[in-house]
Image (cartoon, helix red, strand yellow):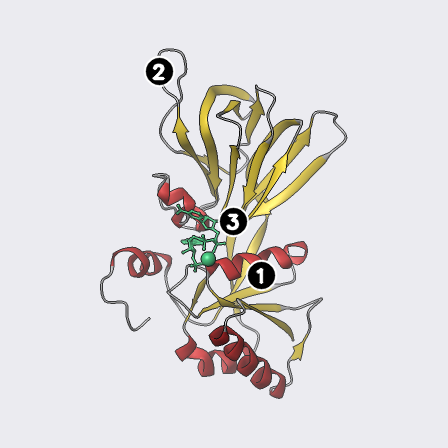
Amino acid sequence: MKFKIVSRGDNRSEKIKATMKQYLTEFDLEYNREEPDLVISVGGDGTFLEAFHRYVHRLDKTAFIGVHTGHLGFYADYTPEELEKLIIEIAKTPYQIVEYPLLEVIIRDKSGKKEDRLLALNEAMIKTAEGSVVFDVKIKGEHFETFRGDGICISTPSGSTAYNKALGGAIIHPSIETIQLTEMASINNRIFRTIGSPLILPKHHTCLLEPIKEKSFIIAIDHFSRTYNNVKSIQCRVAKERIRFARFRQFPFWNRVRDSFVAEDNNNL
Ligand code: NAP
Ligand code: MN
């Protein structure tokens, strides 16, 4: 079994990385940056997002796991206190795999020559630095609304507790294959009208955003954003790929939600 550890880079995470690397190698596991079967992220959810994008080209072969060195994370949900047990469990392979849905984003260029296909673990956010965005929003090929406002966020179920939540979106259990659209400050008056509520689309229901005004867009995929010009359309749907988590013990999603957002006493996590 080949493994790789991605650390946030702070002292605590680096120490944990070194310990894990040493023990797992002593258990005859191979440290391999290029083709790991298991990627261990040590840090926060942000570190996990980075680890995910580093190995996004081999999702069918790589499983992920996150250890948190700060507060409890949604992806980074193992504690440093569990390290010893975790190392033994990893060394014992095979392990149980849990899969979560991802978001596929295809950005098409007006020239018809360029097409970017990206996968998001949390969300895609489409904004502009030049005033408001104006899009025709199509769902399953049918015109749904013309959106004018700060932007649109399209999130995965596991990303529903991140930016999506701050925008008033629902928290979705990751066993549901869906994407959620939330508005960022839409303009609603007698001329412009949008639905106003978050929309939850099932698998195979594609959402297409077609810019009406010539603008440059800022498209953020998880923690990484880029500026795009000459955008013809941005297509979003549930991806055929999925992220695979290595699971060594139960920590149900709703318990993570409770312990992150509502439970007062989570000092022992
Ligand atoms: P960041 O600014 O450190 O992230 C903001 C917070 O979101 C951090 O506390 C991060 O946890 C947490 N987070 C990330 N993914 C999450 C998830 N699936 N569920 C619940 N919380 C989550 O930037 P970052 O660490 O690079 O993470 C990028 C993500 O942050 C974006 O994908 C976006 O969803 C989110 N974000 C949220 C807001 C907001 O809520 N207003 C604003 C900006 C970005 P850690 O501290 O463990 O990294
Ligand atoms: Mn972070």
**Residue of label 3:** 101
The N terminus: image quadrant: bottom right
> Considering only order in the chain, which callout, 3 or 1, is on the residue closer to the N terminus?
1
Q: Few, some or many C-alpha atoms within 10 Å of disc 3 (few <14, some 14-19, many ≥20)?
A: many
> Considering only order in the chain, which callout, 2 or 1, is on the residue closer to the N terminus?
1
Along the horizontal axis of the image, is 183 left or right of 23? left
Q: Few, some or many C-alpha atoms within 10 Å of disc 2 (few <14, some 14-19, many ≥20)?
A: few
The residues tagged by marks 1 and 2 sit, at their Cα atoms, a distance apart of: 43 Å
Q: Residue 264 carries which label?
A: none
The residues tagged by marks 3 and 2 sit, at their Cα atoms, a distance apart of: 36 Å
**Residue of label 2:** 189
Q: What residue type is labelled 2?
A: Asn
Report helix, strand or loop for mark 3. strand
Report helix, strand or loop for mark 1. helix
Q: What residue type is labelled 1?
A: Ala
Q: Which residue shows up at 54% across the image and 76% down it?
A: 17
- Residue furthest to the right: 113
Q: Which residue shows up at 49% across the image and 26% down it?
A: 131
- Residue furthest to the left: 264
- Residue furthest to the front: 130
Q: From the top left corner, tell me how far across and down residue 258 is, in percent.
A: 29, 58
Q: Few, some or many C-alpha atoms within 10 Å of disc 1 (few <14, some 14-19, many ≥20)?
A: many
Q: Residue 51 carries which label?
A: 1
Q: In which quarter of the image is residue 82?
A: bottom left
Q: From the top left corner, tell me how far across and down residue 74 is, in percent.
A: 42, 59
